[in-house]
Amino acid sequence: MNIVVLAGGCSTEREVSIVSGLNVCKALRSRGHRAVLADVFFEADISGELFPEEYDADAKAAQISAQNDRVEETKKNRREFFGKNVLTLCRAADMVFLALHGENGENGKVQAAFDLLGIRYTGTGYLSSALAMDKGLTKTLFLAGGVPTPRGTMRTKAEGICTPQELSMDLPLVVKTCCGGSSVGVYIANTEEEFAAAMEQAFAYEDEVVIEEYIKGREFSVAVVDGKAYPVIEIAPLQGFYDYKNKYQPGATVETCPAELSEELTKKMQHYAELGAKVLFMEGYCRLDFMMREDGSMYCLEANTLPGMTPTSLIPQEAKVLGMDYPELCEKLIEVSLKKYNN
Ligand SMILES: Nc1ncnc2c1ncn2[C@@H]1O[C@H](COP(=O)(O)OP(=O)(O)O)[C@@H](O)[C@H]1O
Ligand SMILES: [Mg+2]
């Protein structure tokens, strides 16, 4: 297949996305596909052969990374999100592998645009992407669909900062921006002062925040591919919670797959992951995050529609337990995503 691996963008996860994209591109090439890497936000090169047989993906990734410093300035001076010629290149592909993470890319807007343009892409569609990007809406749908989620509420900047008492909630509490990602804008508050400060900081990012009970316990994640749960992975940061640093600094977090859980709890978590994916109308693949108390009660925090795809990311680790190597997984994600177009 002729494949464009789309990476970069202008979210806080731009750099991780480039690592995902480079690896996906090389993996797909190793399986015989004519894959090329492109930055969704900056100009694509369409001067020569679009899907060449010989291709230097590392050089392309370096070229994309070299633009990192230009993101903010370009954002200010340009209205359109897509870089010049990016859509032309994508239109020419059989499939676009979305290696984007965060904001534009994960919030459904790229998917909606691609639907209208007839461009085929990996992952779920625009509606589920948009729903999952909003942690408040996700909570509402989880509650309606019987997926356990921490008790919580939403609050807008206009409603202002409040106390836990006013919400009839007890500390410790978690305050997080409604549409953030990578733990940016997630705060754990143990005191009233911390709670007020957390709300203030979260409102600096966004006008809407989610406030929920803090679940003390172990953290897990489960990929759902084509409606079926993959093996559960446990995430244990050596210090603190799974914040930005612990997500991306090598060695900061111990990840164990399959997680050391009883068969019963494993099945239960996989069941809730599949149910969570279903109530959010997920197609293709996604990954759901969980917390579990010592008594075995589990809570789904959120669903990620374009989760990390570097070779050491969580889904590739889960696939490995199933005997699937990284290039096979990349191909599998294309295969399951093509089902969207079969009706
Ligand atoms: N209710 C909660 N109880 C305990 N820890 C939480 C809770 N909500 C979030 N966290 C911690 O914060 C991290 C990020 O929160 P999450 O809701 O997954 O947002 P995102 O990953 O999109 O930033 C989680 O991986 C977890 O470590
Ligand atoms: Mg998360």
Image (tube, grey):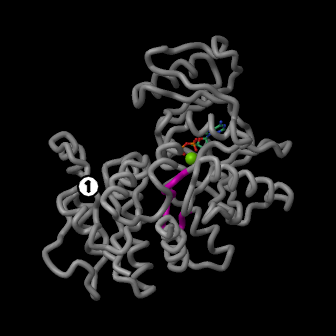
Coordinates of residue 116 in the picture (x, y in percent)? 33, 56
Q: Residue at x 43, y 85 (%)?
A: 30
The stretch in magenta equals 304-313
Q: Is residue 252 left or right of residue 107?
A: right
> Which quadrant of the rendered structure holds the N terminus?
bottom left
- Left or right: residue 273 versus residue 207 is right
Looking at the image, which residue sits at the far top? 166
The quarter of the picture where residue 23 lies is bottom left
Q: Residue 40: horizontal and vertical position, in percent?
A: 29, 58
Q: Is residue 246 above or below residue 142?
A: below
Indicate yes or no whether the magenta region holds residue 208: no
Please, what is the three-letter code of the amino acid marked with disc 1?
Answer: Phe
Disc 1 target residue: 41
Asked if residue 311 can be seen in this view, the reply is no
Pick the front one: 335 or 6 = 335
Q: Main secondary structure of the magenta part?
A: loop
Q: Is residue 224 visible?
A: yes
